[in-house]
Amino acid sequence: MDQKTIKYIDEVEIKNKTILLRVDFNVSLNPNHLTIADDARIRQSMPTIQYLLQSENHNKLVLVSHLGRPKGERLSKFSLHVVCDRLESYLNSNFKVRLIDNFLTESDNTFIDQKEHEVFLLENIRFYPQEEKNDATFSKQLAAIADVYVNDGFAVSHRNHASVVGVTEYLPSYGGLLLKREIQMIEKAMHKPEKPLVAIIGGAKISTKIDVLSKLVNVANYLIVGGGVANTLLHAQGINIGDSLAERDALKLGQKLLFQAAQHDTTVILPSDVVIGDPDELEHGGMVIKLEDMPPYGRILDIGPETKARIGNIIAKAKTIVWNGPLGYFENIHYRQGTDFMYYAITNNTDATSIVGGGDTLAAISKKEYLDKITHISTGGGAMLEFIEKGSLPGIDALKR
Ligand code: ADP
Ligand code: MG
């Protein structure tokens, strides 16, 4: 086993330092790209930011984040400007946040010789093509800004990028408080989970979930599958799914997974009844049918009541629950009942440790009541799945040096 462990910021003394703090402020924006739709990712890193800014420690903070996928181009619609203002509103009123347009041209990084109570935010790090290439020179240039590096961006820690991995070669590197919570909560659920462990995987594509499914099928007692992922598995079993969303070329993948499940003590729960309809039709709801009555051009958009009843029983008895992926086409209100049902089933089971993550999954539940009944809402989508699968991530390994 790996002897080296991460040091978190609350386990070391960081004083009189300039700290380069990698956060994930990749917030969802409204369609105009001018306002923030959901700033949970900013709020979740505030404990780390506040901790590092404690006045008696006299640290200076330079934050690094990406936003969207500008792919190495300076595109104003991906500017962190809007994040800058929001961050400032969450800091003590005497703090200002300054956006550094291009840290490579601010000569000698003089921007850091600041007045007190100034926090810096580098402009979108993915404006630099070197970032996603994990370019060594660029990593050094980033490192040159600071004395210490802290990673609090769990949601980006599956990326082998300069501001996540490369920079740790050149600075003493630590984990932030959000990173710590994410790691500890997911490890607790996955390493020695209290059984029964119930995993729920939904969403659009099996190809984006197959790695985590292959892992879960080994460790979970129940694997509940919904959404397009379930359609693909049903199809792999030779069941007629009409015109439903599925990856029909993933037949072998699906068959292998079902075979694996049979080898282990894992019960795979697939829908037995479904709601079919037209995804773009907003006036009328769909129609509940048994799978065997599937019409040739039917489209499965949600799970049916019989399936919900079976699932509800399993969730109620679970001791550990991991959920990623909506169980239906939740964007249309008529087809979000399965996803809503799952949410309420999980929040009702207050005995269980529950972990929920995924961009669309959170979008489906984030406005609901009882969110506090979920043990841990992960900020990571892809990162959470990869961490469950592999037990670590490149950005986490990089802190273990
Ligand atoms: P997450 O971001 O939480 O990991 P995914 O990106 O994998 O989730 O999948 C979410 C998408 O899957 C949503 O847009 C949802 O509408 C879609 N989806 C789920 N079930 C179905 C279905 N039966 N038919 C069509 N789309 C579906
Ligand atoms: Mg998604």
Image (tube, rainbow, N blue to C red):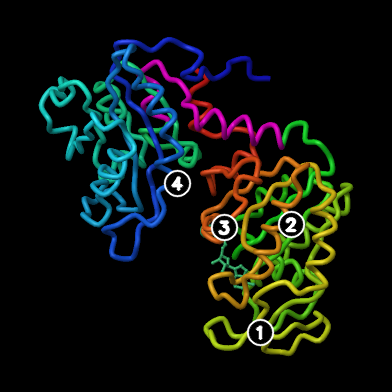
Proximity of marks 1 and 4: CB atoms separated by less than 8 Å: no
Which badge, 1 or 3, comes first in the chain's sequence? Answer: 1
- The answer to which of 218 and 50 lies nearer the viewer is 50
Q: In the drawing, what numbered circle is on residue 345?
A: 2
Look at discs 1 and 4 and give the one toward the viewer: 4
* Residue at x 34%, y 10% (from the top left corner): 15
Q: Residues within 10 Å of mark 4 (few under 14, many from 20)?
A: some
- 3D distance between C-alphas at marks 2 and 4: 23 Å
Proximity of marks 4 and 3: CB atoms separated by less than 8 Å: no
Compared with 312, 303 (above or below) is below
Which badge, 3 or 2, comes first in the chain's sequence? Answer: 2
Q: Amino acid at mark 2?
A: Ala
- The answer to which of 129 and 106 lies nearer the viewer is 106
The answer to whether any part of residue 325 appears in the image is yes
Task: Please provide percent x and percent y for residue 205.
Answer: 60, 63
Q: Which residue is mark 4?
A: 40
- Which quarter of the rendered image does ligand 1 occupy? bottom right
Describe residue 208's horizontal placement relative to residue 155 as left or right.
right
Task: Please provide percent x and percent y for residue 130.
Answer: 29, 39
Q: In the drawing, what numbered circle is on residue 286?
A: 1
